[in-house]
Image: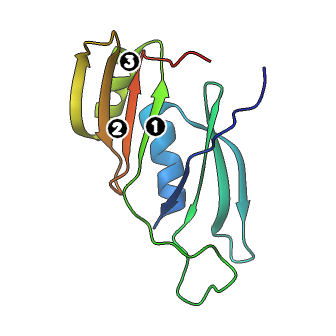
Amino acid sequence: MTAPTFYPTLRYRDPDAAITWLGDAFGFTPKDVFRDDAGAVAHAELAFGDGLVMLGAVPSEDAPDRLRYEQGVTSTYAYTADPDTLFARAKTAGADVAMALRDTPYGSREFSVRDPEGHVWSFGTYRPAT
């Protein structure tokens, strides 16, 4: 297996809560979590299938050495073989349903939900050919 080429990167006001919620809602597993001297998440990598997302905290105003961009809403899509089970799991974890589970004209079964900080997560059976 080769490593993915793209790594979605998200900012959270509470990265620890995001790591826990993403695990509960979707089954993401922490691959690496790096902390600063104060114990706050500096950088985290979470695995889902053969994919990976990275996340960190929204940078503080006095952090000139950090990439400067505000936390904003992102949208990420991931392949899953079983969207029905994952949709039920996400709802149990309290996900805000943005698009209910549905069958699409292009042959995918998919759904979209918002996490507690507003990021949109879509999962479905559509997998682009490589």
Query: Do the numbered discs 2 and 1 sit on residues whose CB atoms are within 8 Å?
Result: yes
Query: How far apart are the alpha carbons under marks 2 and 1?
Result: 6 Å
Q: Where does residue 83 sit, x and y in percent of width and height?
A: 38, 18
Q: Where does residue 106 sit, x and y in percent of width and height?
A: 32, 13
Please say if 99 is above or below 65: above
Q: Amino acid at mark 1?
A: Asp
Query: How far apart are the alpha carbons under marks 2 and 3?
Result: 15 Å
Residue at image location 66% in from the left, 26% down from the top:
50
Residue linked to disc 1:
24
Please say if 68 is above or below 47: below
Mark 3 or mark 1: name the one nearer the start of the chain. Answer: 1
Q: Amino acid at mark 3?
A: Pro
Please identify the quadrant where the C terminus is shown: top right
The quarter of the displayed image where residue 99 is located: top left
Residue at image location 37% in from the left, 33% down from the top:
122
Mark 2 or mark 1: name the one nearer the start of the chain. Answer: 1
Residue found at the far bottom of this picture: 62
Q: Where does residue 41 sit, x and y in percent of width and height?
A: 63, 64
